[in-house]
Amino acid sequence: MEIPVRRMRGLVAAALLVAAACGSGASGDEGRTLNIVGFAVPEAANRAIAEEWAKTPEGEGVRFETSYGASGDQSRAVVNGLEADYVHFSVTSDVLRLVDAGLVAEDWDDGPTKGVVSSSIVVFAVRPGNPEGIEDWDDLLRPGIEIVTPNPASSGAARWNALAAWGQVIASGGTEAEAEEYVRALFDHVVSLPGSGRDATTAFLNGTGDVLLAYENEAILARQNGEELDYVIPDTTMLIENPGAVLIDADPIAEDWLEFVLSEEGQRQFALHGFRPVVDGVEVERVEGAADPTDPYPEVERLLTVEDDFGSWEELSEKFFDGEDAVIARIIAESGKAG
Amino acid sequence: MTAAALDGAGPATSARRPRHPGGLTPASGLGLGVALVWFSLLVLLPLAAVAATTAEGGWGGFWRAVTNEQTAAAIRLTVTQALLVTAVDVVMGTLVAWVLVRDSFPGKRLLELLIDIPFALPTIVAGLVLLSLYGPDGPLGVDVTNRRPAVFLALLFVTTPFVVRTVQPVLAELDPEAEEAAASLGAGRLTIFRRIVLPAITPAIAAGAALAFARGMGEYGSLVLLSGNLPFRTEVASVRILASIESDDLPAAASVATVLLVVSLAVIAAIDLLQRRMVRRG
């Protein structure tokens, strides 16, 4: 049984390949393909941008091969040979991995947005109506408040949350010792450390915890999908910057694509899907799922950034997460022992 | 399916070896060759790659990785939970197999089909189902999430079919005449089970137990939503491996994997030894 079925499958695949080859041959050399590899969240936004791009002369007739998954996994897959022309990751370190492997040029972040193609901020997702009255970072430490956050050890993107918690102490004039104390107290309230942002959202929506440390775009996306949660933007929070880059060996159309992604139209699509635009002058009338759909992205009183508040990704990874005595990794381990 | 395949392969090879001590017939030579190539490509090479990656970090790196307090706690938790779950599986799996073979009741066919569901369900879906049932919003009013029982429950769910599926066919093949003869000679039910049935199904139980244990050691998907991955409390070894991979420390990840493999191997060998002893004694 097994063999004939397999052989048939092979035949069908071959036939399809031949048909595809004929198809592309017939339409001349317009059938160019752009390989996009990215983290899972912006898939819908990228698809919408691709639709808009197809209406422009550059984007007309371009086919897309896309692969979406966990940011770190995707980055490692590209290093190990997954074909990519354009990558879109959740954290800069995932692009730096490609720079180290010689796949992305050293000057990838020289552009006007410094390599950032989409952005968001760290927010507190809460139960509908915010029954616990969570407004700011201090509220998270009130007795009995249970927090869910993805695990900074296994989810690169979760590191934004920990950085926000640390940075807001420093921003309000605190010392490093006070920041450490705050983060330690915060992790004492953490009841679950799911592996990824998506898992954390799932755990929260199934009833775990009072507060989910989340990203604004994730919260908006969840609400767009009809999930029952509200979110609160603290006065001081962290700007999440998702990098995008074109690979050295990419098809030249990848540069056009990147340009379009950074154009007003491209950023408008991101805004509609919950991401904060990275260029000025992007007009959106209404963003469904935002706390206030007509003013979806209110300005944050004090917005922390990697560059201004933490130096660089290399430095902060070493100091907080990956180094021998990384502060946040240590705090998380100790929080477990205390309990 | 896995269980059946393993079961079929085991006796055949061990029975053949003594009969052809030296030479192989061309047909069996070809068979052996294909089997070895297949096994090498799918099992030996990946295992060798894990070992090689472990070696990259050197002995010091290996030792640092596995004696890291948090990692060691995760490995301990994984091994103890896998052992516990295996013990429960052995008892309950045998019981379920017994009921399926010896009793007839309405819905038996349906139950037989359902037993395999944990094999078929993607583990992340299993985790989701368990979370909605035994989570804070679950209809049963039991909340096991983010505590040790969550790990136990998830492992139990994914390993349940193993012992059932290995024991069931052996039990079905068992000739009831021996049991009837023993009964006519005045043996009680317990004695019959202990002296006649148990020795016959012990190898199958052992095979199922080994599979269940090995599966429990490596489980990830069904756990991540349920256990909360809390260090020193509910974090299992596979989560530590993932964390090492995420911080680009492959040798550390491979080191933990190597420990898991060695422990699995040791436990499976121990189960086999125990099984042989019991069969001999029975």
Image (spheres, rainbow, N blue to C red):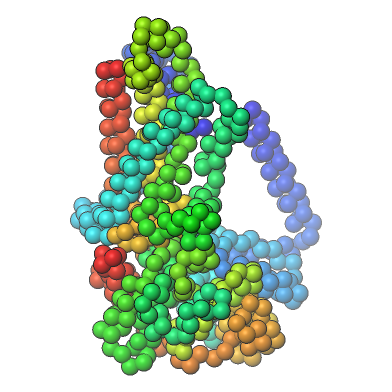
| Quarter of the figure with residue B203 | top left
Foreground of the two, A65 or B231 = B231
| Percent of width and height locating residue A192 | 41, 65
Foreground of the two, A102 or A283 = A283
Foreground of the two, A130 or A119 = A130
Image-based side of A6 in relation to A157, left or right? right
Foreground of the two, B25 or A312 = A312
Q: In the figure, B162 relative to A180: above or below?
A: above
| Percent of width and height locating residue B267 | 29, 37
| Percent of width and height locating residue B17 | 36, 16
Q: In the figure, A287 relative to A193: above or below?
A: below
Q: In the figure, A325 relative to B21: above or below?
A: below
Task: Give the residue displayed 56% in from the left and 79% down from the top.
Answer: A129
Decide if residue A220 is in sight here: yes
| Quarter of the figure with residue A143 | bottom left
Task: Give the residue displayed 47% in from the left and 82% down from the top.
Answer: A134
Image-based side of B178 in relation to A54, left or right? left
Q: How many marks?
A: 0
| Percent of width and height locating residue A39 | 53, 66
Task: Give the residue displayed 47% in from the left and 31% down from the top.
Answer: B96
Decide if residue A244 is in sight here: no
Task: Give the residue displayed 41% in from the left and 42% down from the top.
Answer: B215
